[in-house]
Image (cartoon, rainbow, N blue to C red):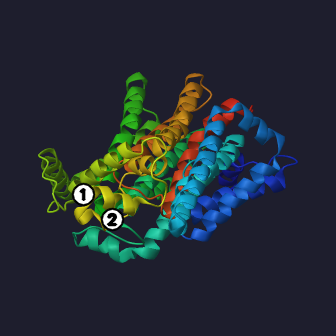
Amino acid sequence: MQRTAAVLSSRFPLREGQSFHTVMVSAGVALLGFGSLLSTASIYLALGLLAVLAASEGRPFLRFCARSPWAWLVVGLTVYMALRLLIAQQALPDQADAISKHGRQLAMVAGLPALFLAWHLGRDPKRVILLLTGLVGSLTVFFFLEAGWSALSHYLVEGGGGRLQFGGHKNAIGGLYGGGEIAALYLVTVLVKQLRQHRWGWAGIALLVLLVGMAALFFLVVIWNQSRTAWLGLVLALVPVALYALGRFHRAERVSREAGVITAVVLLLAVLAWNYSATLEKRAAGLVDGFRGASELQLDDAATGSVEYRVRLLMAGWEALGEKPLSGWGPGRFDFVIAEVGGGNLRDLNHFHNFYIQMAVGFGMIGLVGFLAVFLLPLRDTWCLFRERSLSPHFTLLVIATWVYLLTLNGATIRHDDPVGQAYFVMALGIAGVASVKRRGEIAGEGAEA
């Protein structure tokens, strides 16, 4: 027990003279991570608390914002989106409520809340552990509250079919638990490294088994949910992780405990995927058929498949963007644009099932390019610090894997209109922004090994 306490205290130290501030920041980070799926109010409370605490630091925070190109982009994009929202409201007062609602939702994921989170994580990157532990714990509790043991019995014991759905939109569940899978795998690697530096006690082994069990559960939820976008995103996200692991094996003179545990976890996930190969093949076949129909331009109103719908929406969005390419149609008018441009049985849809088209149609190419810059600039900072050996390989892989996953997810589904989806956007962008804070904020200490 003393050894476990020593490990925890070394990961979350209280700084002298900053104990109250540090505790409050840790409380905000934990509340955002653990409360993200359990309470919408906790999301906004956590983000508000983190914003106030960042502003309370005064000059250091403002100095970082003044020096950071990423911070300038975030603020500039937020100001542009606010102005575009006001212009749309003035032009269409009868739709002011819808415009305001959708504008706020898009602004939530544009980066300003993530800027405050990134500041706190960058000041003490060990808080990343707290954030991800909260997220993984929240996903686990949410599963057993909403789906419960009956779902495990149905799919594991009885071999039940159908898509697993609980607590919200089908594809949202697959997307969130895929992100949780990446977080759980990262926590496994960090714990193994910590246990390697300390002696492997029963408490550490029990915690490791628990984390591996969570990773297996999340992986099964993604499979059972049958979200093909989540499948594709998770596979692509784990490619850089696999390449790094293979490189470590190739260079290593002997297999370490860390490499052995990671290999065992990867093999476990491979066995789980193979066990549900029939489900994977069936859903993949539907995807192939949909793309075949789209490639043959069989896209009239009779084409109601998931892929056909998305292709038709993509074409409608592209046509709408061509009419107003610079500043877009304004937020909150997507149902009108789809009915006006797409027509047919697309009239009942109110979004494009694609975040990039949604952003481009709502805010034009200015908004889309600005968002992509905010989204991708932290990757450059992460890579630069990694090459300078100021960031650990594990943290770098976490950022890359999360970003690949989110970039893929945004291409076929959209959850910015859901508070939980917004929270995941903010957490992912905040973690990536750690590198930008460390590069421009004069943060002392070793890299963001969390």
Tag 2–tag 1 contact (CB < 8 Å): yes
Res 349 label = 2
Q: Give the residue pinned by disc 1.
A: 309
Residue 297 rendering spot, x and y as whole percentages: 14, 48
Determine whether, in the image, residue 117 is placed left or right of residue 364: right
Determine whether, in the image, residue 240 is placed left or right of residue 8: left
Of residues 101 and 110, the one nearer the viewer is 101
Residue 250 rendering spot, x and y as whole percentages: 37, 24
Quarter occupied by the N terminus: bottom right
Looking at numbered disc 2 in the image, what kind of residue is underneath it? Leu
Of residues 344 and 374, the one nearer the viewer is 344
Of residues 179 and 188, the one nearer the viewer is 179
Residue drawn at x 68%, y 48% is: 116
What element does badge 1 sit on? helix
Q: Quadrant of residue 42?
A: bottom right
Res 66 label = none
Looking at numbered disc 1 in the image, what kind of residue is underneath it? Tyr
Residue 285 rendering spot, x and y as whole percentages: 15, 53
Q: Quadrant of residue 295?
A: top left
Above or below, 47 relative to 15: below
Upstream in sequence: badge 2 or badge 1: 1
Determine whether, in the image, residue 325 is placed left or right of residue 72: left
Determine whether, in the image, residue 70 is placed left or right of residue 64: left
